[in-house]
Amino acid sequence: MKQQNFTTGSIWRQLITFSAPIMVTNLLQISYQFIDSLWVGNLLGADALGAVAVSSTVIFTVLSFIIGINNATLTVLSQLKGKDDPEGLRSYVNAFTVILGMMAIFLGVVGFVFAESILKILGTPGTMLADASSYLKINFLGILFLFGYNFIATVFRALGNSKTPLRFVMIAVVLNAVLDPIFIYVFNWGIQGAAYATIVAQGFAFIYGLFISLHYKLIPFSLPSIPRKEEISLILGQGIPSGLQMMVISAGSAAIMSVVTEYGSDTVAGFGAAQRLESIIMLPASALGTAVNSMAGQNIAAGKWSRVHKITLYATLLNLGAMLVASTSIFILASVGIRLFISETEAVKFGTDYIKLVAFFFPFLGFNFVWNGVVRASGAAVQVLVLNIISFWLLRYPLTFLFSDIFGENGIALGMGVSFFISSFFAFGYYQFGKWRKKDLFEERENN
């Protein structure tokens, strides 16, 4: 449960030992929905699985916002750790706890009340509406647990500890896998059982994380109190752009799917299978992006700029090596990987062709994770939001639309790949020449 000080020591060792548990944690979180779908599909059938899939779209949107807010948490608290400011750390942990707690309660109430209306807006088929609504309502009842254990995990990472969050996320995944068949089949609770299994597992992870934090005094929690004005201003100033960033990504992905659906069910199925593989391939880059956010944040606050640039360089090289290995592996095993999810001949062909074509563009997408992670660590949340808008709405969606119009369904992969390549130049350009180094997160606080 040791917390790392990233302002000293071997950068290579810290990058590897800190990012590896994050990568495994992200893999476990991907498996969470997969396990739910596996049990629901096999025990309750296609309609129930469809109800979970539609509800999961709403849950993913909320989770995207939570991840965005947690990016702000990571930036602010890692800088306070780097400044060696225990009082400031305690004060901001309290402020984040109060603000995120209020957000969770608000979203939980609104989501529960309007769950059915949201699902109708999404065009949920009538045969699935009742099941989807009950599944979604139960998940909204437990949203405080989802907020809670993600927040605690982020605080640990900001303080240099990525191993403890892995422990309680693993507990949540294992518990969910065990409770799903019991609640669904043994207790005969149907789709509601799957939802209850999810919130019980998340609740247990939250309580365990809270217990570990308090018992071993790993996180400076205190009795909740009203945050100061400058704390609210800083948290919302960082949190809202970070939350919007994830919304931009989610909406951009939906826009790209609208291009894919024009080519029929086989293309959609093949693309969906390829996207699942892509989510696994990008795990190292995503973990490195989170790691450099914390590592660079501590060093920026400590004024160790030469170390910040070394972190960026080493993470970029590590990303290149990891992504080349992943890209080569998936290029060779593309057909085998796609067939893990689908078996229809035409769908497999499209999915295989897509992943082979886009595979060697993945390192450029990985560069975006690293360079944007370092920039975000300075507190330049709005700038990272703009970079993501450029990436998705000025490059990825238009190029996918344009190339598919010219080359047909094969143009989808080409448009995606070229957008990864071009967007990496925007990310590097802002990292190299932008004014993010002049950002001072705590200027107002220090002047008071």
Image: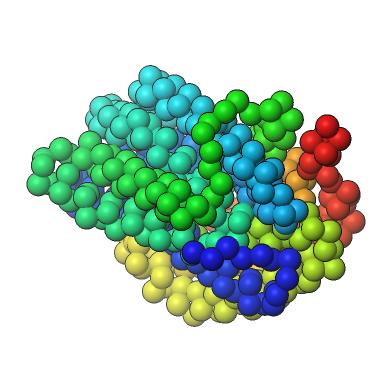
Q: Say whether residue 232 is left or right of residue 188.
A: right
Q: Say whether residue 308 is left or right of residue 405.
A: right
Q: Is residue 225 visible?
A: yes
Q: Say whether residue 312 is left or right of residue 116.
A: right
Residue 393: x %, y % from top left: 69, 43
Residue 381: x %, y % from top left: 73, 43
* Residue 309 occupies quadrant: bottom right
Q: Residue at x 32, y 64 (%)?
A: 343
Q: Nearer the viewer, residue 315 or 161?
A: 161
Q: Nearer the viewer, residue 99 or 376?
A: 99
Q: Residue at x 73, y 71 (%)?
A: 8
Q: Is residue 361 visible?
A: no
* Residue 146 occupies quadrant: top left
Residue 39: x %, y % from top left: 23, 52
* Residue 247 occupies quadrant: top right
Q: Nearer the viewer, residue 444 or 109?
A: 444
Figure disc tally: 0
Which image quarter holds the C terminus?
top right
Q: Residue at x 69, y 43 (%)?
A: 88
